[in-house]
Amino acid sequence: MGAKRKSRTETKAVEAKHEARLRRAFPVVGIGASAGGIEAITSLLKALPKLPGMAFVFIIHQDPKYESNLAQILARSTAMPVEVIRSDTAAEPNHLYLPPPGAELSIEGGVLKLHERTSSGTPSVIDNFFVSLAEDQGSRAISVVLSGSASDGTRGTKEIKAEGGITFAQDDSASVKSMPQSATEAGYVDFVLPADKIAAELVRIAHHDYVTEPSQGRFSEQELLKLYTLIHKKYDIDFTHYKPTTIERRIRRRMALRKVSTLREYLPIARDDQHEVEQLYADILIKVTGFFRDAEVFGTLQRDVFPELLRERDNDPIRVWVPGCATGEEAYSIAISLLEVVGEHKFSCPIQIFATDVSDMAIERARVGLYPESISTEVSPERLRRFFGRINGGYRVSKAVRDCCVFARQNVTKDPPFSKLDFISCRNVMIYFGTMLQRKVISIFHYALRPNGFLLLGSSETIGNFGELFGTVDRKHKIYRKKTVAARPPVDFDMAKPSPPPERREAKHEAEAPNAVFREADRVLLNRFSPTGVLINDSLDVVQFRGRTSRYLELPPGTASFNLLKMAREGLLADLRAAIHTARKKEAPERREGIQIKVNEHAATVNLEVIPFIGTSKERFMLVLFDEPRSSSNPGSAARKSRPETETRQVTRLKRELQATREYLQSIIEEQEAMNEELRSANEEIQSSNEELQSTNEELETAKEELQSSNEELTTMNEELETRNDELAVANNDLLNLFSAVDIPIVMLDAGLRIRRFNAGAQRVLNLIASDVGRPATDLKTTLSIDNLDELIAQVVDTLEVRELQVKDRDGRTQLLRIRPYKTADNKIDGAILVLIDLDVIRKQRPRG
């Protein structure tokens, strides 16, 4: 009994400790849904335990005109308290919160706050709450997008993932797939699961250290370097000098998704799964961005900066660089702002915007320029009308704006920058860099800008200690202007050699201390015992002096020169020149001994050695070394030497100099003869080449005439094609307007009986969506009570006869279904046309007899 009582007591203590831990740090789950969302949220709630350890906030599109019973409906599916928010409410774990119909919700400091719904048009209540959830909760924010139409929730999902939160979306089990599909296709969803499976994953994540203990210790430096090496090998980008807190937070997020708790467990996953490295790389680079982010900044640019850049320009383009452009919103916002200023002030200069990022996926999205409907909360209706077009349930940037922007992959910390720029916008990029990278990037920006060019930084960024390079234009909005300085700061583009992987740098650091000692010992020995000499290049110019060479060399009078032959002292020149020539010719060391030179009016004997070698850059160098023979007798013996012996030594020296001169002259003669022979051969080749060039020139003249004739034909053909394209454009516009004007549902099928086109009436009556184009007609779940539709269509295509039959829809309305063959201009059958006519409406409109 005592043991059992103790066990129960311990169990209760553990449960109390666990509950207290969850209360200290618990995730807040934002759930967004629209059509079909109640069924999905019910399934999710039923799969949750009684105490999941999270706070849940459910946002659904509701009509504010009607009273909602949503709280009572959801209370039947969960044991958690379901609370409709009426005033400021602090979020608590194991609670489900709902906003009242017609209200928007945000969270600030863990407190849920109500706001009046101000936006009209496309609903964005889910996006707005997700954005506030990301800003307030950071890594404890979780988003779930369930069944619904349109794309509300996509932008907020991106914000939550960028702040380190976890994101979910319902899979194909959703009744209406538009909302979860939009978030998934945008690339910001971590888990795509059925609603009940989402519940199980939520419970697991709620107990992970990433959520419950956000302030964890630092990773092991050695393990972190191994992970950096994996990323460096795949993407050639080194995160060593990025801010470690940001990088480690993104790594811990991936660890939570892969269900591991330590970096040691995560390393084998990243090493064996290349897809995981891709996901980690994308997570590290994800950046919060949007159209016209910080509207006041763009207002200042349009009022003060852009007009000044555009003044006094002829046809020179205005050049802009947007490093770290992510998915392109910032670059397109600047392009739109510039186009507005150009139009307002009647400027005519072209616009060039270079937008770069290290993420290939982000660059591809930016080039396409396709964004969800939720951007209507960031872009004004006037700008949407002028600079965007509606397409596939979203917006696409117009061609005029896209033509101003060039997107490319570039690492701003490593690759050479663009030059002669007027404006650089680098917002919220340098906050991820360490101090060393920040200094380097600021120097690169100063190099890339024209004199008086402008630099725009993010609200949390500054130029730091580079006040001598940039002057402040607007301190509040972080706008700076380049200063002209006497000495430009050094800029390293890392072009000579790629930086070694972090793992190698670590090994180098470990061996650095003993290597430094060895190098110092080598230096001491070389300075003490190595012979005096010089290092010369292939032009005989001195590159380096080694030891005291003034006894053998002296600077010549006149124009300054380091040419070795001009610096040689009297008596040394002939042997020096001959030795260099011989060593260069034989590619082997050459030594001359007993050379008599004149040093300060005194004679001296010196030995000379020339050693040729090839440098690392494949350039030829030579070491010229000097040493003096040691005297074998004492100083007094020199005075007792006989005069004939001295004369004999002088004669020997003169003979050696004469022999050296003869050898040198002979070598010059041989080189001259060889050069003459080469010149004769070259002259013959030039004459032959001249004949060939004359023949080629005649052929080119003939080809030029043929090309001119072909060009005229192509010009004529191009004019015909342009005329035909104009006619096709008019016909296409007529067809689109006809489809829009006709209120009768019309569906066109191709030869394979797949949907080719349909109008708004068919979309409304038959529940069609844009993605149904290309689907077989037999796959459609129409509202018509007809079983053999495919047989009827096939019969019409085979017999070429128009079929009409009356059918009823699910509401009991009588419809006239007319099926006719689709004929091309050359009278070929290429499908079928389905037309529906509501007979009940026609009967009501007939006058009563």
Image: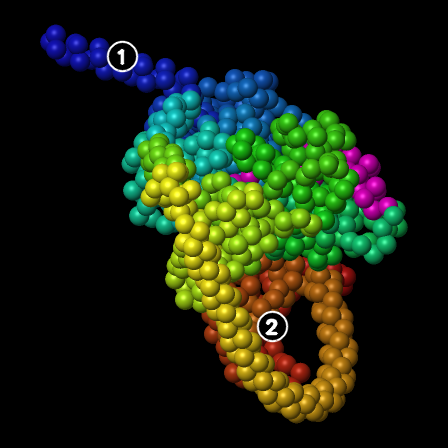
Tell me the residue at 60%/70% (across/down).
Answer: 748
In space, the residues marked 2 and 1 are separated at their CA atoms by 72 Å
791 and 279: which is toward the camera: 279
424 and 405: which is toward the camera: 424
- The tag earlier along the polypeptide, 2 or 1, is 1
Q: Is residue 299 magenta-colored?
A: yes
Question: Element under label 1?
Answer: helix
Q: Which residue is most to the top?
A: 2
What is the three-letter code of the residue carrying label 1? Ala
Question: Element under label 2?
Answer: strand
Q: Which residue is mark 2?
A: 833
Label the magenta part by its dominant secondary structure.
helix
Q: Which residue is mark 1?
A: 13
Indicate the colouring scheme.
rainbow
Tell me the residue at 38%/23% (across/down).
Answer: 217
Position in image of residue 804 (x %, y %): 59, 73
Is 409 on the left-hand or right-hand side of 625? right
Position in image of residue 730 (x %, y %): 76, 71
Q: Is residue 403 magenta-colored?
A: no
What is the three-letter code of the residue carrying label 2? Ile
515 and 397: which is toward the camera: 515
Tell me the residue at 48%/52% (across/down).
Answer: 596
